[in-house]
Image: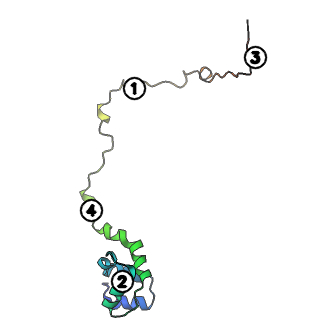
Amino acid sequence: MLIDEKLLIELFEQKDRKRRENLFKLFSQEILADLTLARIASLISAKLGRPGLITAQDVRYCRFYFKDKKNAVHARPMENRKPKPDQPLGAGKVQPGAFKVSDPDEIKLQDQFKFESKFAKKNET
C-alpha cells in the first residue's frame, strides 16, 4: 500500500505508531536537510496543509532512528561481493616441517616451575 500525504495526515491525527516511519519515507530529503528541527517541521506541516501537525520532536525522532535506513537502500547488493575463501591466502604454501610441534607429555612441568623463596634456608654443604 502506498502512503500518500492524505494518509499521513490521518496517521498523525490518530497517533499511529508507524506515522514517523512513513513521514521519513515521504519527506526524507527535507528531514535530513541542514536546517533547524522547528523549521523543517513547519515546512512539512505547510506542505501537508496542516500547520502544527508535525512537531520538531517528530523530525528529531526520524533523524535519529531512520537516518541509517536511507544509507541501507543505497548499499551494495550482496551478489556483487566476492565470497571469502575457506583458507587463508598463504595456507597452501606452508611446508609441513616448518613448525616444530612439541609433545606435552614429554615436557617436565616440575623443571619449569621451580621457585625458590628468599626466606628458605639454604643448604650449605
How far is disc 2 from disc 3 in space, using C-alphas? Answer: 85 Å
- Expressed as whole percent of the image width and height from the top left, the position of residue 92 reads 29, 34
- Upstream in the sequence, badge 2 or badge 1? 2
Give the quadrant of the C terminus: top right
Q: Which residue is mark 2?
A: 39
Q: In the displayed structure, does residue 110 sit left or right of residue 91?
A: right
Looking at the rendered image, the disc whose residue lies closer to the viewer, 2 or 4, is 2
Dot 2, crowdedness within 10 Å: few (<14), some or many (≥20)?
A: few
Tell me: residue 122, above or below residue 57: above
Q: Where does residue 53 sit, x and y in percent of width and height? A: 40, 90
Asked which secondary structure carries label 3, the reply is loop
Neighbours of disc 1 within 10 Å: few (<14), some (14-19), many (20+): few
2 and 3 marks in contact (CB < 8 Å): no
What x and y, as percent, mark residue 25?
33, 79
How far apart are the two marked residues, 2 and 4, measured between alpha carbons?
A: 36 Å
Closer to the N terminus: mark 2 or mark 3?
Answer: 2
Q: Which residue ends up furthest to the top in the rendered image?
A: 125
Question: Label 2 sits on what residue type?
Answer: Arg
The label on residue 99 is 1
In 3D space, how far apart are the residues under numbered discs 2 and 1 (Cα atoms)? 68 Å
In what quadrant of the picture does the N terminus appear? bottom left
The mark closer to the camera, 2 or 1, is 2
Q: Is residue 67 above or below residue 59?
A: above
- The picture places residue 108, in percent across and down from the top left corner, at 58, 21
Compute the Cα span from label 1 to label 4: 42 Å
SS at mark 4?
Answer: loop
Q: Residues within 10 Å of mark 3 (few under 14, many from 20)?
A: few
Mark 3 sits on what residue?
121
> Which numbered disc flags the more N-terminal residue, 2 or 4?
2
In-front residue for pair 42/16:
42
| Residue 18 visible in rendering | no
Query: Residue at label 4?
Result: 77
